[in-house]
Image: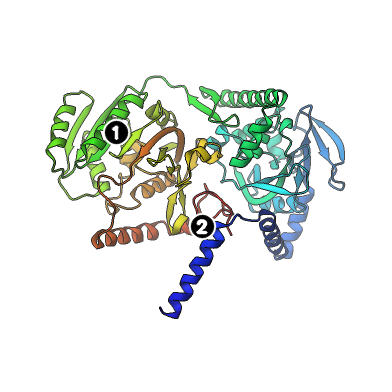
């Protein structure tokens, strides 16, 4: 073995060992503080002077037990100098309000960092940061919450922002009297011209589970699996459980008021955990959905897929379009004949070599639906109402595509959204994590935005798909779905992941694994096309992820 090869192998082994160990969070936090201190100290003098003036314009308000805000004395930690009341209207146009919970701790330079963000985003009205929580004894910091850029759908699903956010005075005066921090966030999100995420841990949330008022404590204590279990144990106490139910009720009321202000008809229900909500938008008629399934042979897989649509789709207005591509077995042809006796199935034949993009684009010629559901033949719907859950978000005017939660046959996650940059280009969030473990993790169990979702199960508005030119046929095998999603994002439409559509995906059964030299070369070329086209976003980082999180593992753990 050459020296270079040996050295590279040792580095890879060291990296593997490093990634297998849990991160010492408090050491990691010290590293972030030092990096932030270096950045702030290197700013030009003019910027420092401007920042100092902006710092002085930031007032710290604490939400107390009575629902009123009290101004915290900036010179003395824990001392409160002025009762503000429930209304925030008295803020000056050039002031900013930093809203925190009682018992929370701010980093010593939090105002300085926010002032820097204001300087860089003068039109922004709402700023928020990453956070963690105080340990029960108040001596340690734990459970970091590294958040994505602003996502209104995620905020509706759960209060992923929590406390420690900053409002402009000009916005606060328009908000009336919010009932708690979550209500305040929703009102601010309705009115803000720009929302800025500061990816620095500046806010340490209190840990007292019995002190939840508006649901945002629940976020702090429950987004990590271990903490969720701890919460469950604590809530076996009747009093705490009742208080938790009350806080969840307050959260639902705030969300219902949010929808009323926006003129949106929606039903708010408890989600997969007490700290999440399921939103069902109320529409009129059901639009037609065209379900497009490419297929070659594999009668049993296709039969399982179609049976599951009829059993678990939860939706009546659909047509199934099977795109036959080079099958050779007699049994599949007989199955096609049987299917065509049903009024909801069409068989169309594509005779060219396998090209995923061409096959699906070809199907548009006979698709009548207002929405297109691209579905692999090796998938199986396993939760009630899968199609309905996807249509629920696809019909929102600012949404361009909707993806689902996909599981492998052993009930580990195959897909819960796509992370740009993971593994060098892109990969599936939480891939390989057991579902039982993932059931308490916010990004898995909440409807939210991603930059992309897999087309193994993806719904797209028909008119938008045609407007964008469909799948890029130069990407016949690799990254065609991610490329489409990124073009949807460029068109100012959102890509939504919903956990309420859940399928098993017996991946690549039909085509087999890409193992031959010819297929490997095909993937290499398509990878180059994708990288060249999306160089900027791959370089800048995924806005729906967080720069503090690793791109070497799919589990949203800290970068080391």
Image coords of residue 23 (percent x, y)? 62, 55
In this figure, what is the number of numbered marks? 2
Q: CA distance from mark 2 to mark 1?
A: 39 Å
Return the disc, 2 or 1, that comes first in the chain's sequence.
Answer: 1
Q: Position of residue 97 (x, y in %)?
A: 74, 41
From the image, tell me which residue sits under label 1.
305
> Nearer the viewer's eye, disc 2 or disc 1?
1
Quadrant in the picture for residue 501: top left
Residue ID for mark 2: 540
Residue 346 falls in which quadrant of the image? Answer: top left
Q: x, y percentage for residue 9?
A: 46, 70
Secondary structure at badge 1 equals: helix
Q: In percent of the image, x 67 and y 50: which residue is there? A: 201
**Foreground: 15 or 63?**
15
> Residue visible at 46% across and 35% down?
498
| Residue 378 drawn at (x, y percent) | 30, 40
Q: Toward the viewer: 44 or 139? A: 139
Q: Are marks 2 and 1 in contact (CB under 8 Å)?
A: no
Q: Quadrant of residue 269?
A: top right
Q: Looking at the image, which is closer to me, 41 or 8?
A: 8
Q: Residue furthest top?
A: 284
Question: Can residue 136 be seen from the camera position used here?
Answer: yes
Helix, strand or loop at disc 2? Answer: helix
Which residue reaches farthest bottom? 3
Q: Residues within 10 Å of mark 2 (few under 14, many from 20)?
A: few
Name, please, the residue furthest toward the left.
330
């Amino acid at each position: 073995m050459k020296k270079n090869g040996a050295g590279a192998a040792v580095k890879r082994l060291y990296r593997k060992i490093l990634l297998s160990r849990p991160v010492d969070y408090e050491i990691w936090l010290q590293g972030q503080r030092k990096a932030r201190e270096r950045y702030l100290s290197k700013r030009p003098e003019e910027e420092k002077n401007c920042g100092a003036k902006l710092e002085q314009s930031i007032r710290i308000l604490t939400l107390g037990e009575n629902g009123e805000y009290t101004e915290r004395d900036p010179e003395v930690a824990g001392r409160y100098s002025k009762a503000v009341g429930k209304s925030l209207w008295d803020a000056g146009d050039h002031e900013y309000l930093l809203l925190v919970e009682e018992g929370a701790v701010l980093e010593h330079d939090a105002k300085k960092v926010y002032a820097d963000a204001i300087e860089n985003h003068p039109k922004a009205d709402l700023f928020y940061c990453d956070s963690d929580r105080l340990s029960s004894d108040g001596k340690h910091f734990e459970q970091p919450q590294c958040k994505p850029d602003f996502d209104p759908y995620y905020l509706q699903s759960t209060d992923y922002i929590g406390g420690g956010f900053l409002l402009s005075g000009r916005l606060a005066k328009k908000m009336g009297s919010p009932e708690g921090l979550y209500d305040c966030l929703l009102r601010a999100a309705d009115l803000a011209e720009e929302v800025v995420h500061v990816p620095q841990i500046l806010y340490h949330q209190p840990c007292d589970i019995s002190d939840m008022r508006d649901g945002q404590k629940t976020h702090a204590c429950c987004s990590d699996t271990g903490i969720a279990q701890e919460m469950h144990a604590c809530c076996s106490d009747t009093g705490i459980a009742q208080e938790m139910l009350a806080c969840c009720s307050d959260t639902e009321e705030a969300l219902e008021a949010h929808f009323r202000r926006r003129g949106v008809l929606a039903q708010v229900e408890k989600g997969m955990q007490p700290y999440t909500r399921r939103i069902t938008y109320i529409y009129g008629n059901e639009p037609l959905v065209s379900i497009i399934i490419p297929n070659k042979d594999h009668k049993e897989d296709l039969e399982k897929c179609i049976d599951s649509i009829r059993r678990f789709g939860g939706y009546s207005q659909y047509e199934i379009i099977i795109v036959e591509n080079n099958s050779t077995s007699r049994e599949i042809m007989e199955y096609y004949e049987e299917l065509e006796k049903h009024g909801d199935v069409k068989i169309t034949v594509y005779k060219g070599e396998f090209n995923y993009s061409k096959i699906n684009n070809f199907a548009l010629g006979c698709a009548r639906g207002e929405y297109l559901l691209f579905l692999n033949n090796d998938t199986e719907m396993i939760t009630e109402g899968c199609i309905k859950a996807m249509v629920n978000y696809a019909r929102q005017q600012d949404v361009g595509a909707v993806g689902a939660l996909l599981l492998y046959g052993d009930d580990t996650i195959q897909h819960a959204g796509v992370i740009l940059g993971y593994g060098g280009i892109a990969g599936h969030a939480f891939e390989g994590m057991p579902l039982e473990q993932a059931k308490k993790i916010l990004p898995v169990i909440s409807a939210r935005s991603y930059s992309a979702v897999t087309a193994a199960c993806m719904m797209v508005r028909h008119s938008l798909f045609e407007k964008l030119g469909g799948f890029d046929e130069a990407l016949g095998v690799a990254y065609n779905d991610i490329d489409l999603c990124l073009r949807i994002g460029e068109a100012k439409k959102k890509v939504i992941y919903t956990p309420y559509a859940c399928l098993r995906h017996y991946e690549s059964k039909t085509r087999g694994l890409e193992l031959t030299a010819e297929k490997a070369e095909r993937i290499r070329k398509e990878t180059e096309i994708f990288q060249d086209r999306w160089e900027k976003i791959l370089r800048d980082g995924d806005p729906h992820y967080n720069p503090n999180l690793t791109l070497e593992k799919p589990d949203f753990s800290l970068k080391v």
